[in-house]
Image: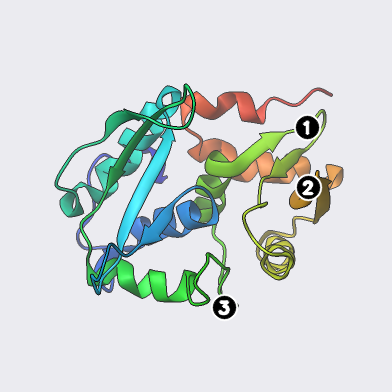
Amino acid sequence: MFGKIKAINKGDTVGSLTSTQIEILIGSLLGDGTLRKQGTRTNALFEVNHSLQFSDYVDWKYEFFKEYVKTPPKSRKSNGNRIAYRFTTQSLPVFTEYYDKYYSLGKKIIPSNIKLTNSILAVWFMDDGSKTRNSFYINTQQFDIESQLLLIKCLERDFGIKSTLNSDKQYKRIRIRTESAKQLKNIVAPFTRPCFYYKLTMTP
């Protein structure tokens, strides 16, 4: 499982990124990860940004992308009293390919041909998953309804996981149906970093 990998296997490549890097990148884009272009630059960079309390998670992602990063992760004051911990890659063609897919409308969207894997789902859950009393939410409020409905279809198609849209004030997010909660947990648990174990604890 990729959670145990400490070095990138250069023989396991898909284009210019390894298959593991691609899965972490896509999982991050479904969650809190960002691709953006700076100024007039042609190519995009990948940014990982989480609260300081999840520095282990940021460092873990950094280990897979450090060949593309000039400055290691560091903390900085964010909104209010929040201390963020982040890194950004260089602006490179390997990231522009995914920028063109996920930001084709000028905002983050879900490509129609996306296919989820266990690893992608695990990163997505670590980024944006949360628990209810007996199931889980995936906080997809950043996406439009069309993208969220596509993700619901993907969860059922790729894993047999049933989910629905749940209201969160004026937004919507994905709620895993109770009958699929254990299945989701079994998929993501082997990959979950220790700082996120609390997300997997459900009350019977």
Question: What residue does disc 1 label?
Answer: 132
* Dot label at residue 148: none
SS label for mark 3: loop
Query: Label 3, label 1: how many angstroms apart (C-alpha)?
Result: 30 Å
Q: Residue at x 41, y 32 (%)?
A: 78
Is 51 displayed left or right of 131 in the figure?
Answer: left
Residue 175 marker: 2
Residue ID for mark 3? 113
Q: Are marks 3 and 1 in contact (CB under 8 Å)?
A: no
Secondary element type, mark 1:
loop
**Mark 2 surroundings: few (<14), some (14-19) or many (≥20) residues within 10 A:** many
Disc 1 residue crowd, few under 14, some 14–19, many 20+, Cα 10 Å: some
Q: Earlier in the sequence, mark 3 or mark 2?
A: 3
Q: Quadrant of residue 51?
A: top left
Q: Quadrant of residue 53?
A: top left
Choose between 190 and 101: the one closer to the eye: 101
Q: Amino acid at mark 1?
A: Thr
- Residue type highlighted by circle 3: Asn
- Where residue 123 sits: x, y (%)? 50, 46
Check contact, mark 2 vs mark 1: CB within 8 A. yes
In the depicted view, which residue is nearer to us: 35 or 156?
A: 35
Upstream in the sequence, badge 2 or badge 1? 1
Residue in front for this viewpoint, 41 or 116: 41
Across and down, in percent, residue 173 comes to 74, 50
